[in-house]
Image: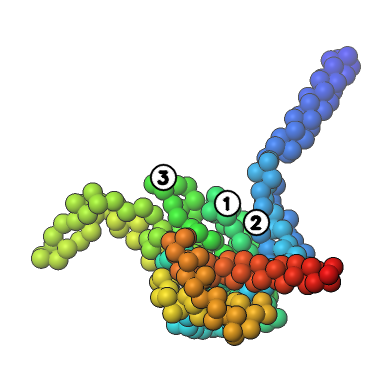
């Protein structure tokens, strides 16, 4: 009987040792709960994923220095998003925001500028790639209840049919049984008003009810996501005058005088023509190129003069 008891004890110990080794290997494979970051280390964070699928918030040491005063000729859009953000940081009711429209016209720059404007008042920014939106619930759990006010920022957002991240975003916006935290908003930018591709064939699904036109299920599904953003802000292409005004602002910021700015207008228009766009991004790219070229030319001329 003693031998049997010793044998069972040995077998049990062997089994438990093997089970412990198996659990250790399993623990290394399975994603762990995300660790809380050092909230005092930064005002902006990125959600990162490792090869094992584990996610964490990475502090951004040097956030983009964009300022609200640098954003020209989008005064209405700027005022509306700024007002919503001020409501949010003061604890008043505020909406999730969807910024849509022409590329390079200030959508993402506006969000970055708002962080710089209100970071000292407790605003924080968390950038999340579209592919990582499935982790939104984990991110929300990390920041729920904290004293800071968080904007979860998704840039260039769009979805294809069957995209799993689409439903994850819907749930966080307004589709869960749990109430969303009052210290979190989602600001997203997109070139698509309804965030998903729209096809002509979907219009054929529309039907009439008592003389009223009702869209088909495919269109209803696509509209349902964008409608969960309480504030829609549209951006439009700049006119030639607005484009040149933005060019002048950036050249002036880079230390170029008014006479040279006036002389640069023709080059600025040619630059935009080559790129097929009169956007704020194109204006900034031109200003850097023109100012840099002028400084290089001046340095070369000065060096040549000294050699003589």
**In the rendered structure, which disc, 1 or 2, sits on the residue that comes first in sequence?**
2
* The quarter of the displayed image where residue 119 is located: bottom right
Name above or below for residue 155 compared with residue 80.
above
Q: Quadrant of the N terminus?
A: top right
* Residue 153 pos. (x, y %): 57, 64
Q: Which residue is nearer to you in this view: 212 or 275?
A: 275
Dot 1 crowding, Cα within 10 Å, few <14, some 14–19, many 20+: some
- Number of marks present in the image shown: 3
User: Does 102 sit left or right of 182 as displayed?
Assistant: left
Q: Are marks 1 and 2 in contact (CB under 8 Å)?
A: yes
Q: Can residue 193 be seen in this snapshot? A: yes
Q: Which residue shows up at 17% across the image and 63% down it?
A: 213
Residue at numbered disc 2: 47
| Mark 1 residue element | helix
Disc 3: CA contacts within 10 A as few (<14), some (14-19) or many (>=20): few
Q: How is the image coloured?
A: rainbow
Other residues around mark 2 within 10 Å, as few (<14) / some (14–19) / many (≥20): some
In space, the residues marked 1 and 3 are separated at their CA atoms by: 15 Å
Tell me where residue 257 sits by quadrant: bottom right
Q: Position of residue 169 (x, y in %)?
A: 49, 57
For residue 164, side relative to residue 61 (left or right) = left
Q: Position of residue 299 (x, y in %)?
A: 76, 70
Q: 158 or 279: which is nearer to us?
A: 279
Residue identified by numbered label 3: 162
| Tag shown at residue 132 | 1
Q: Secondary structure at mark 2?
A: strand
Q: For the point 40% across and 71% down, which residue is it? A: 236
Q: Secondary structure at mark 3?
A: loop
Q: Is residue 87 left or right of residue 46?
A: left
Q: Residue at x 85, y 21 (%)?
A: 10
């Amino acid at each position: 009987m003693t031998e049997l008891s010793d044998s069972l004890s040995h077998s049990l110990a062997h089994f438990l040792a093997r089970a412990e080794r198996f659990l250790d290997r399993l623990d290394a494979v399975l994603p762990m709960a995300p660790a809380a970051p050092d909230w005092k280390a930064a005002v902006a964070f990125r959600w990162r994923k490792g090869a094992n699928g584990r996610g964490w918030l990475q502090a951004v040491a040097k956030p983009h220095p964009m300022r609200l005063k640098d954003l020209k000729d989008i005064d209405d859009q700027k005022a509306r998003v700024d007002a919503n953000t001020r409501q949010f940081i003061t604890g008043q009711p505020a909406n999730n925001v969807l910024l849509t429209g022409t590329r390079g016209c200030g959508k993402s720059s506006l969000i970055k500028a708002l962080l710089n404007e209100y970071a000292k008042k407790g605003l924080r920014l968390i950038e999340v790639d579209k592919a990582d939106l499935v982790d939104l619930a984990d991110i929300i759990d990390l920041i729920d209840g904290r004293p800071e006010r968080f904007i979860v920022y998704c840039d260039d957002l769009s979805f294809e049919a069957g995209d799993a991240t689409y439903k994850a975003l819907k749930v966080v916006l307004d589709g869960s049984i749990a109430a969303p935290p009052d210290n979190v908003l989602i600001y997203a930018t997109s070139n698509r008003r309804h965030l998903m591709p729209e096809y002509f064939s979907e219009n054929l699904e529309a039907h009439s009810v008592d003389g009223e036109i009702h869209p088909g299920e495919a269109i209803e599904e696509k509209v349902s996501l964008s409608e969960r953003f309480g504030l829609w802000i549209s951006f439009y292409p700049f006119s030639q005058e607005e484009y040149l005004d933005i060019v002048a602002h950036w050249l002036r910021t880079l230390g170029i005088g008014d006479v040279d700015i006036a002389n640069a207008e023709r080059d600025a228009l040619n630059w935009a023509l080559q790129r097929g766009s009169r956007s704020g991004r194109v204006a900034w790219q031109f200003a850097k190129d023109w100012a840099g070229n002028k400084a290089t030319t001046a340095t070369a001329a000065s060096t040549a003069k000294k050699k003589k």
